[in-house]
Image: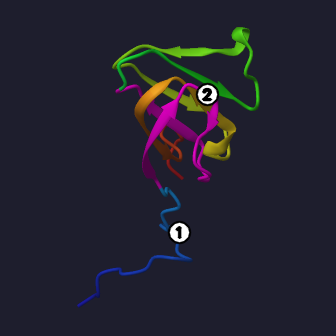
Amino acid sequence: MSQPFTDNNGTTFYNINVCRSFSRVLAGSLVALENQPCSEVVIINNTATTLSAYDDGYSGAANTLIIPVNGIVEIRGITNSSQVSANGTGRFSYRTQYFSLNPQR
């Protein structure tokens, strides 16, 4: 009888999709998200105000991604969540993840 996998490191089926969830309080200034390797970040605006998000150091008005109250936005094409910054007031949540739309191998 075969044994169940407890560690699949080094196999064809090794899962590198490490996801993490975070909650952060903003106090009205631009703050980079937590340093976590990922290919995308899902931001959930559960504050009482609009949030602004930016990527790759662009923080001008022309580069603002506005997230309405109770809005959810996904930012892709990054290699680390610290490439994304947010500005607003209150506590918001976000999740880092890999490969949500990549084809399977």
- For the rendered model, the colour scheme is rainbow
| Vertical arrangement, residue 75 with respect to residue 23, above or below | above
* Residue at the spot of label 2: 29
Q: Residue 39 or 6: which is nearer the viewer? A: 39
Q: Which residues are magenta?
A: 19-46
Residue 86: horizontal and vertical position, in percent?
A: 58, 29
Q: In this view of the protein, can residue 77 be seen by the observer?
A: no
Please rate how many residues cluster around mark 2, counting C-alpha atoms within 10 Å: few if below 14, some from 14 to 19, many from 20. Answer: few
Instruction: Name which quarter of the figure residue 70 lies in.
Output: top left
Numbered marks: total: 2
* Residue at the spot of label 1: 12
Residue 74: horizontal and vertical position, in percent?
A: 50, 28
> Which structural element holds mark 2?
loop
Q: Residue 16 or 40: which is nearer the viewer? A: 40
Residue drawn 46% across and 37% down? 25
Please rate how many residues cluster around mark 1, counting C-alpha atoms within 10 Å: few if below 14, some from 14 to 19, many from 20. Answer: few
Residue drawn 53% across and 69% down? 12
